[in-house]
Amino acid sequence: MRIFIITKTNDLWSDRIINNIYERGPSSWVYKIYKYQTIPPLEELLDEREKYLPTKIPECDLVLPLGLPADLVLLLPLIAKKSGAKAAIIPVDNSEQVPLGVQKQLKEEFSEINVDSVFPKPFCSLRTYKRNQFIDEFTKYFGYPLIKIKVSDDLITRVDVIRGAPCGSTWYVAKKLINVRIQDAEYVASLELHNYPCLASREIDPLYRDSIMHMAAYHIKNAVKKAIEDIKKI
């Protein structure tokens, strides 16, 4: 799978995701990255979209923007069209970067060029799409956390990450769960996600009425809860 990542310079959140995908994604995946050095004014962007496209747009299957402000996000359908992409994953870990109005516009523009698009909020909420092979290929490895654990005398002795948060937090939490009592595992998982730290927005999201960071914490807690339930069934 060929992935075109569009981001900006000096963005800790984006760099951490890129490094994690590089480290833990399949060796067969091919990556191309473009980093914006400066952010042009919105007025110029709307008038001259072509002028502010990446200088080189490679052929790809999946477009993955990371950390772009709402102004630059509006360029994505044109980037996807020029790259021949069939899918786009637009993470929403900060609602100000991809507000609902922008999401609606993007979905319409992507649909017009037959590009499937998803907007996981937070990025670690991404699940299997079942409509697009490239999105599904990505979600085999990254997205909503899925783990398996082994227990001895109510202590967790091993944690295997089947699918992890793109930022790498699931693998971090997995290490911290070793030798933790199963009755304390959900609490420890949530605590360690914040210690990682999760870089999703702490602001209250109007749709969730909670912070996106807290949503990420719920996801890892639920993953741990499910893993423990699976052990009990066995």
Image (spheres, rainbow, N blue to C red):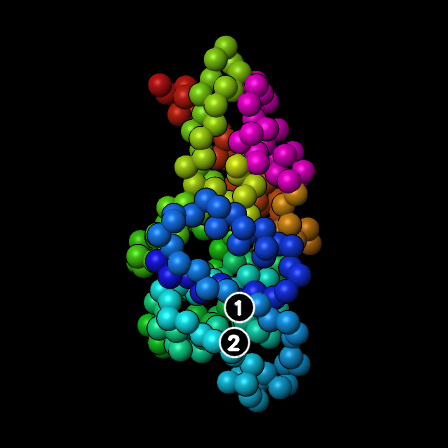
Residue at the spot of label 1: 34
Number of residues whose C-alpha sits closer than 10 Å to that of mark 1, classed few (under 14), some (14–19) or many (20 or more) = some
Q: Is 37 situated above or below 165?
A: below
Left or right: where 12 falls relative to 53: right
Q: Quadrant of residue 88?
A: bottom left
Asked whether residue 39 is drawn in magenta, I would say no
Say if mark 2 contacts mark 1, CB within 8 Å: yes
The C terminus lies in quadrant: top left
SS state under label 2: loop
Which residue occupies 46% across, 64% down?
Answer: 32
Which residue occupies 56% across, 65% down?
Answer: 7
The N terminus lies in quadrant: bottom left
Q: Find residue 164 and report its horizontal and vertical position in percent.
A: 47, 42
Which residue occupies 51% across, 20% down?
Answer: 156
Asked whether residue 194 is drawn in magenta, I would say yes
Q: Find residue 63 and report its horizontal and vertical position in percent.
A: 44, 65
Left or right: where 12 falls relative to 177: right
SS state under label 1: strand
Q: Which mark is residue 54?
A: 2
Which residue occupies 57% across, 44% down?
Answer: 216
Q: Quadrant of residue 9?
A: bottom right
Number of residues whose C-alpha sits closer than 10 Å to that of mark 2, classed few (under 14), some (14–19) or many (20 or more) = some
Q: In front here: 98 or 4?
A: 4
- Which kind of residue does numbered mark 2 sit on? Pro
Magenta residues (range): 172-196
